Image: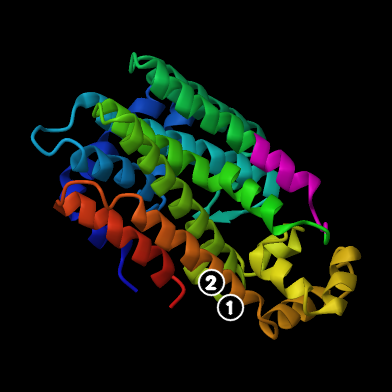
């Protein structure tokens, strides 16, 4: 598998600047927040979301250097993403993220919730200071979507009647919205046409959906070391993802196990076995491939450049994580 960081060569220097800025932006108000921020931003994340923002910024500013507002948008994007992870880990009671202890496992739920709140608030403040109302609206919608996705996921726990459409909507809220709206926002800061801005939005939307579907497949096929969290954790918590929904159409007993919330000893292992013995994984792969292909098609009209090629390669990278 191609490492994600190898795709970021056109913005490698930009990402170094971003990494230097993030902890200072977040953590200069309080020692505990600084410690939490240092832990979060040093936790081995791939920086895919800000990298996409920076790549789009460079791909749409070919004759000029990117602006401080582009850089700040990338930082805001990573702050929003990180805030959502902090809250997700509290809700999911996850003790490990990216292979390291989560904020709440180190500092307690109270600090974790407040740290997540602070990150959202701080990102909103920096967002307002971009002085671009359209960009503010886009990223504000992301924060609403993240909350809506988490609520929807909670309401649909162990719901075997969940449709693929509802699953994709939740996946958009929780993952694709940030990539889609920050991609469009980067284009708006570059003053691209409305049509190009919509193409960038659709690039991010389809890429984000492909990314989430692949993550959901890896929950069954990946190792704890690869995932940075225990394998099968989504199913165990009642979060029914694409492989499960497809498998339910083939494996009637899987519904029985899920309906009783995998409560009996051996239920989880049996459920995973039924999913792996079905076409669920393969059909989920096909769904991910569909969205990855759709993503790449959206940026074909951008002028050729290293950054555009990296954005195209990103769609291949998402699928390569499966192999």
Residue picked out by circle 2: 286
| Quadrant including the N terminus | bottom left
Residue ID at (32%, 46%): 52
Q: Is residue 263 above or below residue 182?
A: below
Q: Percent position (x, y) of residue 317? A: 35, 65
Q: Is residue 150 something one can see in this rendering?
A: yes
Residue ID at (27%, 37%): 18
Q: Is residue 107 something one can see in this rendering?
A: no
Residue picked out by circle 1: 282
Q: Percent position (x, y) of residue 291? A: 48, 59
Q: Is residue 146 above or below residue 132?
A: below
Residue ID at (62%, 32%): 113
Q: Main secondary structure of the magenta part?
A: helix
The reply to whether the magenta stretch includes residue 155 is: yes
Q: Marks 2 and 1: in contact by CB < 8 Å?
A: yes
Q: Percent position (x, y) of residue 12? A: 19, 49
Circle 2 crowding by C-alpha within 10 Å: few under 14, some 14–19, many from 20:
some
How did the renderer colour the structure? rainbow
| Quadrant including the C terminus | bottom left
Q: Percent position (x, y) of residue 211? A: 48, 58
Circle 1 crowding by C-alpha within 10 Å: few under 14, some 14–19, many from 20:
some
The reply to whether the magenta stretch includes residue 229 is: no
In space, the residues marked 1 and 2 are separated at their CA atoms by 6 Å
Highlighted magenta segment, given as a residue range? 148-159
Left or right of residue 271: residue 97: left
Left or right of residue 128: residue 113: right
Q: Nearer the viewer, residue 265 or 238?
A: 238
Report how many numbered discs are placed on residues in the image: 2
Residue ID at (31%, 40%): 53
Q: Residue furthest bottom?
A: 277
């Amino acid at each position: 598998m191609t490492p994600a960081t190898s795709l970021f060569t056109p913005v490698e220097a930009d990402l170094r600047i971003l990494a230097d800025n993030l902890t200072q932006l977040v953590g200069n108000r309080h020692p505990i927040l600084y410690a939490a921020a240092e832990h979060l931003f040093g936790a081995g994340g791939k920086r895919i979301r800000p990298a996409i923002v920076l790549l789009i910024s460079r791909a749409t500013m070919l004759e000029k250097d990117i602006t401080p507002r582009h850089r700040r948008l990338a930082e805001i994007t990573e702050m929003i993403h990180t805030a959502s992870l902090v809250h997700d880990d509290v809700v999911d009671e996850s003790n490990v993220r990216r292979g390291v202890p989560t904020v709440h496992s180190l500092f307690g739920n109270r600090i974790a919730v407040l740290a997540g709140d602070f990150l959202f608030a701080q990102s909103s403040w920096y967002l307002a200071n971009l002085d671009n109302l359209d960009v503010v609206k886009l990223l504000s919608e992301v924060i609403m979507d993240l909350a809506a996705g988490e609520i929807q996921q909670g309401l649909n726990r162990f719901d075997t009647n969940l449709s693929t459409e509802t699953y994709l909507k939740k996946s958009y809220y929780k993952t694709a919205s940030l990539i889609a709206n920050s991609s469009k926002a980067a284009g708006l800061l570059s003053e691209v046409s409305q049509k190009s801005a919509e193409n960038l939005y659709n690039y991010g939307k389809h890429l984000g959906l492909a990314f989430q579907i692949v993550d959901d497949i890896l929950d069954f096929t990946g190792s704890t070391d690869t995932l940075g969290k225990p394998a099968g954790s989504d199913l165990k918590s009642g979060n029914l993802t694409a492989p499960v929904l497809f498998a339910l159409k083939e494996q009637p007993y899987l519904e029985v196990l899920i309906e009783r919330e995998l409560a009996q000893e051996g239920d989880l292992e049996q459920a995973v076995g039924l999913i792996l013995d079905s076409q669920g994984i393969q059909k989920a792969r096909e769904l991910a491939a569909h969205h990855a292909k759709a993503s790449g098609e959206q940026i074909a009209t951008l002028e050729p450049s290293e950054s555009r090629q990296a954005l195209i390669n990103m769609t291949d990278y998402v699928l390569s994580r499966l192999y």
